[in-house]
Amino acid sequence: MRTASNIARHELIGLDTVAISPDGRETEGRVIDETRNMLVIEAESSEKRIPKEHTVFRFFLPETKEWVRVEGRVLIARPEDRIKKRLEKW
């Protein structure tokens, strides 16, 4: 089960998110793809490619019905490699 403490070790595709850029702009949508350095978010009928580094993400966890804030730098890795990586606190 995804929780606030282990979200970086789980699948992000399909989660609702709000991406907050360094200049404060917010992009809301659903994660539809992920690469090592980017999240692809479907927002308002278009796809936005959001760099993980320097971005703060808020993910909605349907299991616990809560929003979780994650620093993008913690997510920089291929999704399959994040499980193996020792994660820092965010």
Image (cartoon, grey):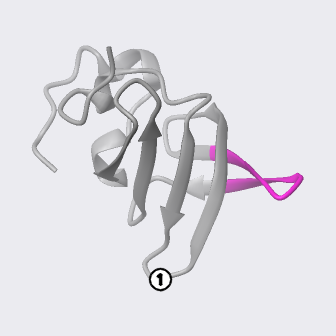
Residue 20 lies in the magenta stretch: no
Q: Residue furthest bottom?
A: 23
Left or right of 31 in this view: 69: left
Residue at 27% of width from left, 44% of height from top? Answer: 74
Rendering coords of residue 12 (x, y %): 50, 30
Rendering coords of residue 59 (x, y %): 44, 45
Which secondary structure is most common in the magenta stretch? Answer: strand
Compared to residue 11, the image places residue 43 above or below, namely below
For the N terminus, which image quadrant? top left
Relative depth, front residue between 21 and 78: 21
Compared to residue 32, the image places residue 57 above or below, namely below
- The part of the chain drawn in magenta is 40-49
Q: Residue furthest right?
A: 45
Residue at 37% of width from left, 52% of height from top? Answer: 72
Compared to residue 43, the image places residue 15 above or below, namely above
What amino acid is at disc 1?
Gly
Residue at 56% of width from left, 72% of height from top? Answer: 26
Left or right of 87 in this view: 25: right
Residue at 59% of width from left, 34% of height from top? Answer: 34
The part of the image, by quadrant, that contains residue 4 is top left
Left or right of 64 in this view: 45: right
Residue 46 lies in the magenta stretch: yes
Rendering coords of residue 83 (x, y %): 29, 16
Relative depth, front residue between 52 and 28: 28
Which element carries disc 1, helix, strand or loop? Answer: loop
Residue that mark 1 sits on: 24
Query: How many residues crowd around disc 1 within 10 Å: few (fewer than 14), some, or many (20 or more)?
Result: few
Compared to residue 16, the image places residue 81 above or below, namely above
